[in-house]
Amino acid sequence: MLENVVGLEMVYQFHSRLRHTGTRMKEVAGEPVDVVRPSGGNISGLMANPILQDAEEIVPGVSVTRIENQEWAFDVADYDFGSGPVLPERGDTLTRSTGEEFRMVSPGGNDPVYRFTTSGRSRFIVTTERVKR
């Protein structure tokens, strides 16, 4: 019986690591961003990794990436408003150095805005949508 439990744990760890590796392969170089929480607090210069998005065909035969929704990867330890690491919340905004602003949203309605990418929960991905001005 113990062999089955150990075997299942190994399968889970392998699956978790494979999922993490697949996600990391889509990450591009990190960039410093500013994060603001509506209820107060901000993080300046947080290193974030945008996740590559699939290209859309807006004009037939021409593939471009138009980013309205963007996923970002962070280390949990870095997401800290000053009193220790916290988890992202719906409504937190992320601003790139270019001035583009993204608001954290839940991809599934009432689901959290984040999902962990490692079994040790040391890294997570958030889903954001572009703030239209």
Image: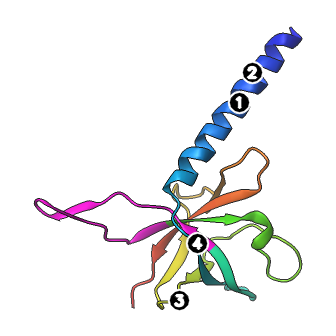
Q: How far apart are the alpha carbons under marks 3 and 4?
A: 12 Å
- Label for residue 12? 1
Highlighted range, magenta: 48-70
Where is residue 30? Give x, y as percent.
Answer: 58, 72
Q: Quadrant of the N terminus?
A: top right
The residue under label 2 is 8
The residue under label 3 is 97
Q: Quadrant of the C terminus?
A: bottom left
Where is residue 90? Give x, y as percent.
Answer: 62, 71
Q: State whether residue 26 is above or below residue 13.
A: below
Task: Tell me the residue at 69%/69% (across/down).
Answer: 88
Q: How far apart are the alpha carbons under marks 4 and 2?
A: 34 Å
Could you say which is closer to the camera, residue 43 or residue 41?
Answer: 43
The residue under label 4 is 30
Three-letter amino acid code of the residue under disc 2:
Leu
Give the SS element for disc 1: helix
Labels 3 and 4: the sequence-earlier one: 4
Q: State whether residue 91 is above or below residue 27.
A: below
Task: Tell me the residue at 53%/89% (across/down).
Answer: 97
Which residue occupies the extreme front position in the image? 29
Give the SS element for disc 3: loop
Task: Tell me the residue at 67%/38% (across/down).
Answer: 16
Q: How far apart are the alpha carbons under marks 2 and 3?
A: 44 Å
Labels 2 and 3: the sequence-earlier one: 2
